Amino acid sequence: MGKIIGIDLGTTNSCVAVMEGNEPVVIPNSEGGRTTPSVVAFTKSGERLIGQPAKRQAVTNPHNTIFSIKRFMGRRIDEVRHEIHEVPYKVVEGDNGTARVKIDERLYSPPEVSAMILQKMKKTAEEYLGQEVTEAVITVPAYFNDSQRQATKDAGEIAGLNVRRIINEPTAAALAYGLDKKNKEQIVAVYDLGGGTFDISILQLGDGVFEVKSTNGDTHLGGDDFDQVL
């Protein structure tokens, strides 16, 4: 049976891990980094760049460099009016009021762009493991609705992955710390400070089951915002 990888598809950065023994191991990318910028760029020559190479040329090619695509996943154009004004690339209305990214004259759906990032993560895992990877678990924020979760699953399938499960990010963090192995009921607060968001989730744990009781936060506060202020 092939390995199942775990992917954190983040607003600013993404990362991929695999279980080795009983421990999750983060896989470094081809540049040696444990995280990969969630950035996709199209050059004037038609080349597609993903990750660090895309981020490096963002200043000189802002209109063709896509970042923070996670903010548009599974959302209609009328829900992202604020976000549209925060990015230099063009976001337009697609079929049925959906949001689409326009690069040159081509329209890309958010799941299509996210799939490009997921393909990079898939390739990173395959190079590390020395075998093809076809199955994955992908994390999403606890506040993601059904539409946003489905869009994430769609992105995985476009990337050639059978998405075994969409899991809440705070639940994934609790699992990574082994909180499911403590044989007692407990209530845990999980803070998630990312590159683009900051949120808190209250989890109730019991009998190996995680239930998200409450979640809140600021979807426009993260490390990138700290950088801009500094």
Image (spheres, rainbow, N blue to C red):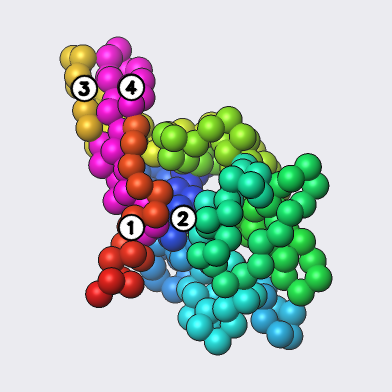
First in sequence, mark 1 or 2: give its number.
2
Q: Residues under labels 2 and 3: Cα distance?
A: 27 Å
Q: Nearer the viewer, residue 140 or 99?
A: 99
CB under 8 Å between discs 1 and 2:
yes
Residue type, label 4: Lys
Visible in this render: residue 122?
Answer: no
Residue behind mark 2:
11
Q: Is residue 29 magenta?
A: no
Which residue type does callout 2 highlight? Thr
Secondary structure of the residue carrying tag 4 is: strand
Q: Which residue is mark 3?
A: 187
On screen, residue 69 above or below 153 = below
Identified at 22% across, 32% down, the residue is 189
Q: Is residue 212 magenta?
A: yes
> Overall secondary structure of the magenta stretch?
strand
Q: Which residues are magenta?
A: 190-214
Residue 214: percent from left, percent from top: 33, 26
Q: Amino acid at mark 3?
A: Ile
